[in-house]
Amino acid sequence: ATGKEVWPKGDEKVWKAGMRGVDQDVSDITKSFVNHVQTSLARQAYNLDNLGAYQAAALSVRDSLLVNWNETQLNYTRKTPKRAYYLSLEFLMGRTLDNALLNLGLKDKYRKGIEALGFNMEDILEKERDAALGNGGLGRLAACYLDSGASQELPLWGYGLRYQYGIFQQLISPEGNQLEAPDPWLENQNPWELPRLDVTYEVRFYGQAERNQDGNGRATWTGGQEVLAVAYDVMIPGYKTKTTNNLRLWESRPKRGFDLNSFNAGNYEGAVESSNSAAAITSVLYPNDSTTFGKELRLKQQYFWTAASLQDILRRFKNTGKPIAEFPDCKILNSMASTHLSDDPSDAAIQLNDTHPTLAIPELMRILIDEEELSWDEAWKIVNNTFFYTNHTVLPEALEKWPVPLVEHVLPRHMQIIYDINLYFLQAVEKKFPGDRDRLARMSLIEEGYPKQVRMAHLACIGSRKVNGVAELHSDLVKTTILKDFVEFEGVSKFGNVTNGVTPRRWLDQCNVELSDLITKTLKVDKNVWLKDLTKLEGLLPFAENKKFREQWAAIKQRNKERLAHHVQSTLGLTVRTDAMFDVQIKRLHEYKRQTLNILGVIHRYLTLKGMSPAERKKSNRKVVFFAGKAAPAYYIAKLTIRLIVNVARVINADPDTKDYLQLYFLPDYSVSLAEVLIPASDISQHISTAGTEASGTSNMKFCLNGGLLLGTVDGANIEIAEEVGESNVFFFGHLTPAVEDLRYQHTYHPVPIEQKCPGLAKVLDQVSAGLFGDGAPYEPLLNTIRQGDYYLLTDDFDSYIAALAMVDEAYLDRDEWIKKSIRTTAKMGKFSSDRAILEYAESYWNLEPTSIA
Ligand code: F58
């Protein structure tokens, strides 16, 4: 503010009319906005900044959502349809206001109202903080599925944790090191959540589990620590439908405020100790790379969340009071799974998003046996018909395992149940494969060792009705590698595939408004039609041949690049040239994702440019390379990669010989909101994991949906994208999955010096070592991962990678042909809508039907 601002902003008459709340000329929107300014925020037109305006707008939109949410929930209660529950430890929601306005179809009206009050829509949207309760793809997938579930009118709820702190904020030091800062996202209040202080459950930890003497398999679990789970509800509006589903997030609180005895004895710290430890459970999201397991607090998070969610699900059932057929004394059994009537779970399906919620399996067993007094077989049948497990990785180091002593200590009763499950299971395996000791050891829920560990993927698999991977190749790998024995034992029909998808509402309509408008105009259908049936995009195909259309398409890409350049200028003070190809790689930093291959490729390009005469250089393609992504705080090699990128950028952006042809940026603090600016601006994006390591990828889908082409390995969903858009529109390189094992064997037993095997790469590494980008010594550990062992096969794929980059350059020189590829790519992305994916889960897994809200 300049100090000279005139208050109120906007039209004083509209403000006054809004304040009186009676004037017929004032739209409902401005009325409700002004009302929230005055009452909920206790502020006035005379001191309202953009943040306040955002909050007032959010509260006003929330009122509209609440009407639909209430109707939806009432409808479910009355009609008691079968429900599905998506249990995910992560929901990476990003911002809500823009999405809610678009789904409600109210964006234009709000824009006008807000402008009349003197505010600018884009400015207030920027004030919202991301809800970043997730690490990456797995968490964002959960958010897309909630959007699609509501949009397709499915009775689908999410269950998660209300972390006080989301994924850490990433800062980059002048030396290029990643620093982590907390993400206090709830600091300015969160208008999107409804605290439900009346919905609470008790959750126990530690204590003693005593098996009953009468041999009925039951036990009593007592003592230990009891904490309270309090529900916070987040409304999930469907696109252009009244259906507004719920995401329930649990917060942990102490059951009793503090210990009065200690307090009275003057021991104030002691008095609050246990309450602090209860509150700690939901304090922070684990910023995992895939290996840091074994932490007690994480185990407590997992149990706290599954136990609270199951109690909530069971209470909801009991309230339906459904007719009891087969087991007259047990409502739960009948409403949950009429297993004796048909093979179909009848009342609830629970999807396990990775193994993180697997404790729900022994927990439901515990409730059914110890509390509802069912027999083991009855309980196991229900469990087996209720759960579904999605696997998101086959990397061995990423498969969750919990030390037996830890589980025994924190959840003594669950450890007993896991042992019992294992006993019955191994007896069945032994029956089918008599005397096959190795097989029993491989399949056991318990891995021998010091300490013994519980293999959560095995537990999730045998406790579930179905198991799926997230792309065709990945699902095949699940069946042939990590769960091979289980396929042989249980039959292949239990194992399926649901290729991931992304919501076209956020990832096209919201993030690329101009492209969405052009598509609507061109397809000559209402926007709702193609946004809900994304295969309609195929109607764009003929327009690839239309010159005027291509010009419009290209002009939009150009403006998206300018928007990104403007963002970089205003946040980092750096000037990005926009008359260049934009090449983007944005994802968590991980060795298997091979950001290192990309940065070494950039150095290679730089050295090549340096070696050219000025005249030669003039003929080369201008390029700007963007990286963004966080490294797990303890992942040393990933952090070194960031450091290398930042220091290479520092050198090459300042080199007068090359800076017109090659620029490089590492954008700090990657987030959903940043992705929404980066993705629409990309010409080419990189998805270059070692073959067989990336389960699916979902940003590849987002880029292609926005007309960006793909440079990638034959991995994950890249393969299915190429099947749809045609291989001629994708740049593939590198070895294929079946070759990987062999190549690794060669590295170990017949290593060839890098100078011999891949001289181009050797030269690049030498330049880094020699100090071209600042002291080379700190990078040695990173470079040595390639020189020795090279587990992720950079030396095997480097040459074909460089060749693929050259093909990208060549293709880009023929701009008209490039735009055609871009249009054809978008046109063929229909398959990758998360609507398709969620309907596959609903039909082939959960047996769930849409329920409309009249
Ligand atoms: C990702 N997994 C896969 N895990 O890597 C990606 O290929 C896939 O597209 C996506 O799931 C959705 O299916 C992933 O994001 C995590 O972030 C875990 C968080 C918890 C600890 C272990 C990693």
Image (cartoon, rainbow, N blue to C red):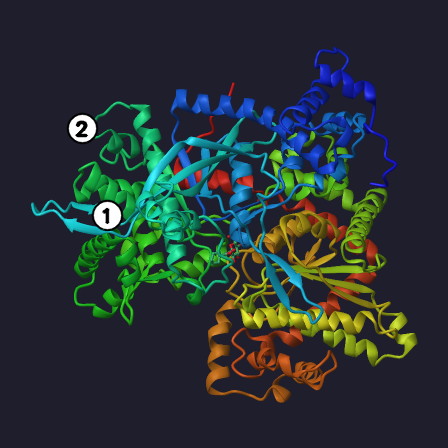
* Badge 2 density bin: few <14, some 14–19, many ≥20, Cα 10 Å: few
Q: Kindly identify the amino acid type of the residue bearing the numbered disc 2.
A: Asp
Report the residue marked by disc 2: 329
In this view, the residue in front, 50 or 754, is 50
Q: Secondary structure at mark 2?
A: loop
Identify the mark nearer the N-term, 1 or 2. Answer: 1
Report the residue marked by disc 1: 223
* Badge 1 density bin: few <14, some 14–19, many ≥20, Cα 10 Å: few
Q: How many marks?
A: 2
The residue shown at (83%, 43%) is 552
Q: Residue furthest left?
A: 214
User: Height in image: 835 above or below 804?
Assistant: above
The residue shown at (80%, 52%) is 570
The residue shown at (33%, 60%) is 455
Relative image position of residue 195 (x, y in whole percent): 49, 33
Q: Quadrant of residue 424?
A: bottom left
Q: Secondary structure at mark 1?
A: loop
| Position of residue 830 in the picture relative to residue 434 (left or right) | right
In this view, the residue in front, 255 or 471, is 255
Relative image position of residue 775 (x, y in whole percent): 70, 82
Gap in Å between the C-alphas at discs 1 and 2? 29 Å
Relative image position of residue 457 (x, y in whole percent): 36, 57
Q: Kindly identify the amino acid type of the residue bearing the numbered disc 1.
A: Gly
